Amino acid sequence: MSWEADVRILLILLLCLWTGAAQAAELVRTHGLALVGTPALPPDFPHFPYVKPDAPKGGEVATAGLGTFDSFNPFIVRGTPAASAARVFESLMTRSADEPETAYGHLAAVIELPEDRKGVAFELRPEARFHDGTKITAEDVVWTFNTLREKGRPFYRQYYADVASVTAEGPLRVVFRFTNDQNRELAQILGEMPVLPKHWWASRDFTKPLTEPPLGSGAYRVASFEMGRTLVLERVPDYWGAKLPTAKGLANFDRIRTEYYRDATVAQEAFKAGQVDWRIENIAKEWATGYDFPAVAKGLVRKESLKRNLPTGMQGFAMNTRRPLFQNRLVREALVQLFDFEWMNRNLFYGQYERTLSYYSNSDFASSGLPLGAELALLEPYRAKLPAAVFDKNFTLPVTDGSGNNREGLRRALALFKEAGWEVRDRKLVNAQGTRFAFEILLSSPTYERIALPYVQWLERSGIEVRVRTVDPAQYQRLMDSFDFDMTDTVFGQSGSPGNEQLEFWGCTAAKAEGSANTMGVCNEVVEALIANLLRTSDHASQVTAVRALDRVLLNQHFIVPQWHSDKVNIAYWDRFGRPSAPVRSGVVIDSWWIDPARAAVTDAARRMAP
């Protein structure tokens, strides 16, 4: 080949590289953002595919809340907010329930990504209004962002840490600039920020629990309430966004009444009595045996298990590593060895669950086998700082015969305890100073005692002294916010595209921030580095590699006693609803249901006649 041909090829390659770089640097104006690929719906999509766009509106439904509430401000640590009141607020973008981590413009008509990808701009819809008729402006967005970061719950500061500035460049245009271009999901995180009315909050203290109905811009507003007992939301008849593609076919009930009950058992009885219209059942025994009542036999109440194609996360007994007792990894691993999942699944759950072996269960982010290829390369620099098992062993959990006689697990646990400086004397597990190994399991409901008490018995066989303490949900939240507990039963939910929230779950800053989601006090140099790497990933393949490496490290630190998961949503409801026929990735979207007059007439008449 001649040198002229070589030069031509080189010029062509340089041109291709320049063109690719130019394309990558183009300003983008879009209707939605997807963290994986591109949004599935085009700019002119008429409505979400899992709704009936002309669904009838009307009627009242009743739901159940547990515990109590004393505030309508869910954005601060203080107070116990009314969860259903979140419907009052709206955000710049709305997530699709049928796509992994995709959101579409809602308050914002256009999302703009600059050439350098170090920022995002939102252009608001001119018709967007708060419920008092005031126009929503860029100043409201700026004020909301600054207020949440300065006065809101700790995770806002974590989420927004890479935002350098926010500016209103006009009445309807707000621009965020970032400190770098590495945080691939920050634009979407900002898009999902609720927008609050600056003028309404001017005369109120944002740092205090809110005891009056809040001003919002959503499809619902607070109609009435009895603090701690009842909350009634009413559909806004002149809701500004009713015809948007992100709102069609949703918010079909005229009124949503939430009744608060002291615990799940009372709430279930209220459902059976017809005082509550639907119920998501998370307790396997209740799903198997608790719905044998006349209304089910007569077809007035229906039960369904709907497939859910979402990550199920991690549920388990979480250890507070801020406590000296749980700071030794060998001690934590010993506590994992003593848990007998097979016995529980057989005797308590009717075989309905699978053992959870990943923080990202039911997704392709879950690690398995030995680390290979890109994942091994990512972990290799930290080999000296990690347990050898990260590289040499496929992570597994003890498997028993389900008889309840977990001798092998007990033997392994006692060996680990001994290595960590604990041994059994006079049937008590003690350290060299003779101090007994003792701790408390904190629960938020008596329902969880049936799970905790068998585990307590297994722990006691190794000489451990364990107490179970059950408190009301409000007190439980206060204790969790201040990290005043030893061990608790909790869930770490995961999204379809793990990202910034991992800092809130496992980051050192969150471990020290009151009210954060870092329940276990995780503060680990390697974990921090792996999260930083995750946030820099630019494609799905590298994201999967990063999350699997993080998962493997977390699992081998044994911060939690993993429990179980299911890929189904169990829902029971009084047969008074219509709903779209298309399945949805999340399993169920109650907001897309509506009241069917013919069915409701039959069901409501039967409920009125019931004793």
Image: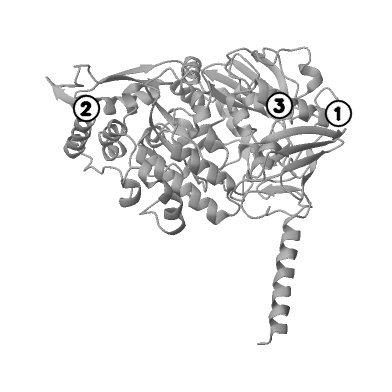
The location of residue 334, given as percent across then percent down, is 26, 33
The location of residue 603, given as percent across then percent down, is 58, 32
In front of the other: 119 or 294: 119
In front of the other: 555 or 301: 555
Q: Secondary structure at mark 1?
A: loop
Q: Which residue is mark 2?
A: 421
The mark that comes first in sequence, 2 or 3, is 3
- Residue drawn at x 72%, y 39% is 93
Q: Is residue 611 left or right of residue 10?
A: left
Residue 243 occupies quadrant: top right
Amino acid type at circle 2 is Gly
Q: Which residue is mark 1?
A: 135
Residue 562 occupies quadrant: top left
Q: Which residue is mark 3?
A: 88
Q: Check contact, mark 1 vs mark 3: CB within 8 A.
A: no
The reply to whether residue 346 is in sight is: yes
Extreme residue in the front direction: 3
